[in-house]
Image: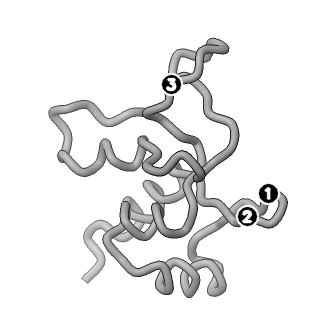
């Protein structure tokens, strides 16, 4: 699911990768074999932190407490952008 431009401006950020070293395989939104370089399934902790507006240390804390799932691929720990969106959605309205 991709946020439209009419949605909150920063929500589109959760569907884009930033650095080229973030996530290995990338896939097109259309499901074809075409690679769309503006969209990444997985991001590293620095990009996850940037997208959520927190520090990389906070990302580590959320992961170790089991509040934010991650994917370990080789030596890298990556975060699914859909998990980041679910994390935000679950906290909307929390006081």
Q: Residue at x 26, y 70 (%)?
A: 93
Q: Nearer the viewer, residue 47 or 1?
A: 47
Does residue 57 appear left or right of residue 35 in this picture? left
Q: Which residue is mark 2?
A: 76
Tag 3: Cα neighbours inside 10 Å, few (<14), some, or many (≥20)?
A: few
Distance from Cα at disc 2 to Cα at disc 1: 5 Å
Does residue 95 appear left or right of residue 40 in this picture? left
Task: Say whether marks 2 and 1 touch (CB < 8 Å).
Answer: yes
Disc 1, SS: strand
Say which mark, if any, is on residue 73.
1
Q: Residue at x 54, y 68 (%)?
A: 45
Q: Which image quarter: residue 69?
A: bottom right
Q: Which residue is mark 3?
A: 36
The N terminus lies in quadrant: top left
Q: Residue at x 57, y 61 (%)?
A: 44
Q: Earlier in the sequence, mark 3 or mark 1?
A: 3
Q: Is residue 7 above or below residue 67?
A: above
Disc 3, SS: loop
Image coordinates of residue 65 in percent, x first then y, are 62, 86
Q: Is residue 17 above or below residue 28?
A: below
């Amino acid at each position: 699911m991709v946020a439209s431009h009419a949605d909150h401006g920063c929500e589109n950020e959760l569907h884009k990768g930033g650095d080229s070293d973030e996530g290995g395989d990338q896939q097109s939104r259309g499901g074809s074999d075409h690679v769309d370089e503006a969209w990444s399934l997985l991001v590293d902790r620095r990009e996850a932190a940037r997208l959520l507006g927190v520090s990389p240390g906070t990302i580590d804390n959320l992961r170790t407490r089991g509040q934010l799932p991650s994917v370990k691929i080789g030596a890298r720990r990556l975060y699914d952008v859909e998990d980041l969106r679910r994390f935000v959605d679950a906290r909307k309205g929390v006081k």
